[in-house]
Amino acid sequence: SQLVLRLLERAALQHQLDPSQSPVRLAVTEADRAMSDWFRMVLILEGVDPCRVNSMGRVCLYLTDAMERWPQIFLADGGWPAEFATEMQGVSFASGPDLRISTMIPRTLDDVSPVELLEKAWDSFSKNAIASLVAISALAGFIWLFL
């Protein structure tokens, strides 16, 4: 709760400087900035895009199960256990397979009008509906015969 209060105080100060800004947006921005700074400190990341830092940090938290194992150290200013830092920094990120260029052979589009599409759909529906009715009638007659 103290952490939330600090973030809200920072957002309130920003709102006093620029009242046209949404207080909610400012609070979320402050929380995002605090997480980004914390992840940079924990993961020892410099020169990485802030969006990537937050993504990497969240993945590390998830993969190490840190929020279950060390819930009290989230956004702490330091003093976290060595095991926490080692595990967080030990998560590696590798990109997926290389992009492979494929070729597609162009073909002409079927020149079918919307009316023809609807007629085909209706024919298919009506055939299926008639077949279903016949099957249900036969089943009902079969059941009635043996009752």
Image (cartoon, grey):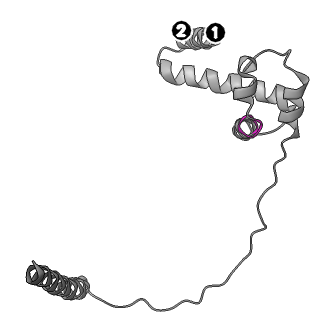
Q: Secondary structure at mark 2?
A: helix
Point 73% across, 34% down: residue: 65
Q: Is residue 45 visible?
A: no
The residue segment tinted magenta is: 60-64
Look at the image and say whether residue 63 sits in the magenta stretch: yes
Mark 2 belongs to which amino acid?
A: Gln
To which residue does mark 2 refer?
16
Q: Earlier in the sequence, mark 2 or mark 1?
A: 1
Q: Is residue 43 visible?
A: yes
Query: Considering the image in quadrants, where does the C terminus appear?
Result: bottom left
**Residue 10 lies in quadrant:** top right
Point 83% across, 25% down: residue: 41
To which residue does mark 1 refer?
6
In the image, residue 52 above or below residue 126: above
Mark 1 belongs to which amino acid?
A: Arg
Q: Position of residue 141 (x, y in %)?
A: 10, 84
**Residue 17 lies in quadrant:** top right
Asked whether, in this view, residue 35 is left or right of residue 42, the answer is: left
In the image, residue 42 above or below residue 112: above
Look at the image and say whether residue 120 sits in the magenta stretch: no
Closest to the observer: 87 or 134? 134
Q: Position of residue 85 (x, y in %)?
A: 87, 28
Q: CA distance from mark 2 to mark 1?
A: 15 Å
